[in-house]
Image (cartoon, rainbow, N blue to C red):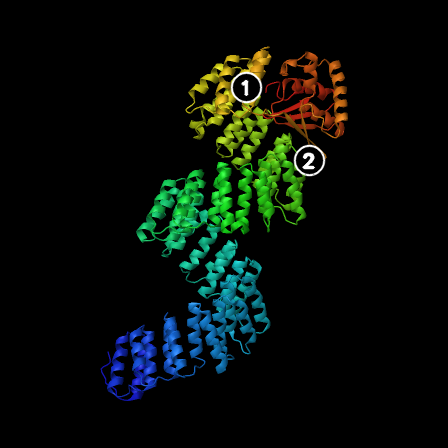
Amino acid sequence: MILLQPRSRFLLQILLNRVQNSFRCKYGCTQIHAHIIKSGHSDDNTLNNHMINIYFKFRSFGDAHQVFTEMHKPDLVSWTALITGYAQNGFEKDALLAFAKMHNLGVKSNEFTFPSVLKACSNMVALVQGMQIHCVVVVTGYESDVFVANTLVVVYAKCGKLSEARQLFDGMTIRNVVSWNALFSAYVKNDYSDQAIYLFDEMISCGQKPDEFSLSNLVNACTVCEDLSQGRRIHGYLIKLGYHLDIFSANALVDMYAKLGNLVDASQVFDGILEPDVISWNALIAGCALHGFHEEVLQMLEEMQGVGMVPNMFTLSSVLKASANLELQDIGKQIHSHVIKTGFKADIVVGVGLIDMYSKCGCLEDARKVFDSLPEHDLITWNALVGGCLQNGNAKEALSLAFCMWKDGINWNQTTLFTLLNAAASLQDDLICKQIHAHVLSSGFQEDIYVTNSLVDAYGKCDLIEDARQAFEECKDRDVASFTSMMSGYAHCGQGEEALKLFSAMLHEGLRPDCFICSTLLNACAYLSALEQGKQVHTHIVKLGFDLDVFSGNALVNMYAKCGCVEDANLAFLEIPQRGIVSWSAMIAGLAQHGHGIEALELFDQMLKEGIHPNHITLVSLISACNHAGLVKEATRYFDSMKSMFNIEPTQEHYSCMIDLLGRSGKLEQAKDLLNQMPFEPNATVWGALLAASRIHGNLELGQRAAEMLFKLEPEKSGTHVLLANMYAAKGMWENVAQVRRMLKDSRVKKEPGISWIEVKDKVHTFIVGDKSHSQTDKIYAKLDELNDLLNQAGYVPKVEFDLHDVEQSEKEILLFHHSEKLAVAFGLISTPPGTPIRVKKNLRICGDCHNAFKFICMIASREIIIRDINRFHHFKDGSCSCGDYW
């Protein structure tokens, strides 16, 4: 409180200075204002201008305005004080109105007025007003003033007119560091960070010394450009100029190193900060979360709280992300409780983090509760919930929620469409896929590469390969992911050759393959049994340095196993540096396909010793291995202990494998009992296994029952008719065979033809029964005739019971000898060097006559013949088969 009542102008000025510098409340200012009026100095512009500045400083805007309006004749300084006060306190419109009034009154602006009013224009992003003031600046001759020119650059930059801002900058005769900073900031904020880096080189070459604001902006630019080398260079300048200790600059460095994955340097910079603030902690924690160091995120949270730092919503968001990826539901719930206590529960960022955490932990109901508790549902929260449904295998619910979102007036974006296309692919719903495609076209997202790639992938998984190809061809800027999606579609639809052709086209376009595309190609080769092409892909993998990649390693194991090279599959398995459950399951499945049941069991035991917990796929492969080797006791032991040993409930697949195993081994009654004990209705796979076992052991009654169920469950499949007809034919019941054929014809179900493939010189050749379309047909049939004579001499007797035609035996023998697998083997014998193995793939089960014939042919030709049928591999060598005639 001021007790004196000074009369002199000089003393009043001193008191005003003291009040202004003491940061006291406006009470003292009001007292002095009263003294000014009483002492007769109310017309003194200098005192009044000072009062205006002080009132604005103490945010007493009404008083400042009143002082100005009570002035008899405000001068330029008065107008400038008023305009500056408005511009600095968020009253941009008032600043512009005051400037217009001043200009209309004929009061000319100076180098202090223009920067203030231009700042108001930039804050409002008011380009038109900024251009008008620019004209006044030019007319009054202040364009060459460095302070005025700097604010003009900022106005144009903030209004998105970067070329005009750069033109102004280039035209400046005098530039200071603020000039450069204005342009740096503009480039970074408008996503032209690369231009900011180029500008920095220009700044250095001009001899201008940067300050901490210049360098902090450039650090952010390097972060956006993901340019670590330039970031290190800027870091060097910060150290050289002594700005590295500045908290703002240090935080920018931590953020850059962390986001670019260099967490060691990020930690070093962080440790060098004397007093890290919450921004410092958040930058390092967010970097760890971004790059998958989730345990470190939780550890840092403890350290942060240990030094008394209170986490904010950004901290909690990163911690929730870590909890979600680690599936630590308990920690996630603790954070949720903390969020509610601290009042962050209504925050959208934290809400999205909670939805994501609960979704990834499999708690979809809790995720929905969090969603419902949010005061507003924006695009991000909807996307989080829709994505969570899909993550939990509920594709239908994801689609339903997306349409609710649409009804609520929230337009879908790229993330939504990506999720919906994945949902359509998961459901293999071609109608939904086409509807989403129509929306993509109508909303203009067809130019978005991520949406297009998802569309190609969805069409491929919906078996609409032509639609996938059209979407792929219409994509202007195809990348490696585009090719991966298209190749995956070809592989899924059984068109492995097209996938391999597309790979060649991709290399021709100069694109560098990644580990995912190599895995896709290997799967295509596995489907085709294209060993040589698979080896070529393996070569690419080694050259590109992906040989230590887990995905590529798993795909190599699968490819070699399905191409008949179980030894090479094992070598690929041993080279995988960190074998997870997928790696072990792939190798066990490979051993199973080749009938190496004992080896599969030994590998499974080794897996358990190394602490790898099996999943349901591993156990399916294990029981299948026992099935192919006839290991009934071992399979029964593992099947009965699935729940107690591994906490895995048997699924339809496990029951199907066990029923098939029991049936093939002749234990049909046990197979029936197991079917009756199933806790759910048997599906087509289970009844199919029972029908196959009935055919092997000639149990017509059981086979008819299984066939009846399959006719209801899978009326579109021809395999049931074929197996049932086989059973009737084996018993000479030709009338029943004819009846089954009529049923097949009347149902308009097309019988799946037997097809065999063989790869020769990087090309896959296809054959069907009696095929005469091949360019070397004459040589193939000549080789068959030659083999026929040699087989008869060796004691081969055709098994005519495997032909279903009611014709003479001699005609049956001819029909049997023209089966697709025999044609493929004959082609292999005339097209490959002597002594090399012949590898053939067949889409159906190999017939008994072909199986018998190949045991003779492998001895006659001195070749190993490897046949991969729909169930397993058969290695024919030295007159016997690896299956031991058990298949």
Q: Nearer the viewer, residue 408 or 636?
A: 408
Q: Are marks 2 and 1 in contact (CB under 8 Å)?
A: no
The image position of residue 528, as x and y in percent, is 64, 33
The image position of residue 130, as x and y in percent, is 46, 73
Checking the image for residue 532, the label placed there is 2
Query: Residue 820 falls in which quadrant of the image?
Result: top right
User: Which is more foreground, mark 2 or mark 1?
Assistant: 1
53 on left or right of 642:
left
> Residue at label 1?
743
Q: Nearer the viewer, residue 481 or 181?
A: 481
What is the count of numbered marks? 2
In this rendering, does residue 630 appear at all? no
381 is higher (above) or lower (below) than 692: below
536 on left or right of 680:
right
820 is higher (above) or lower (below) than 250: above
- What amino acid does circle 2 point to? Glu
80 is higher (above) or lower (below) than 356: below
Gap in angstroms between the C-alphas marked 2 and 1? 43 Å
**Label 2: how many Cα within 10 Å (few below 14, some 14–19, many 20+):** some
In this rendering, does residue 866 appear at all? yes
Query: Residue 79 falls in which quadrant of the image?
Result: bottom left
Q: Callout 2: helix, strand or loop?
A: helix
802 is higher (above) or lower (below) than 275: above
The image position of residue 245, as x and y in percent, is 47, 65
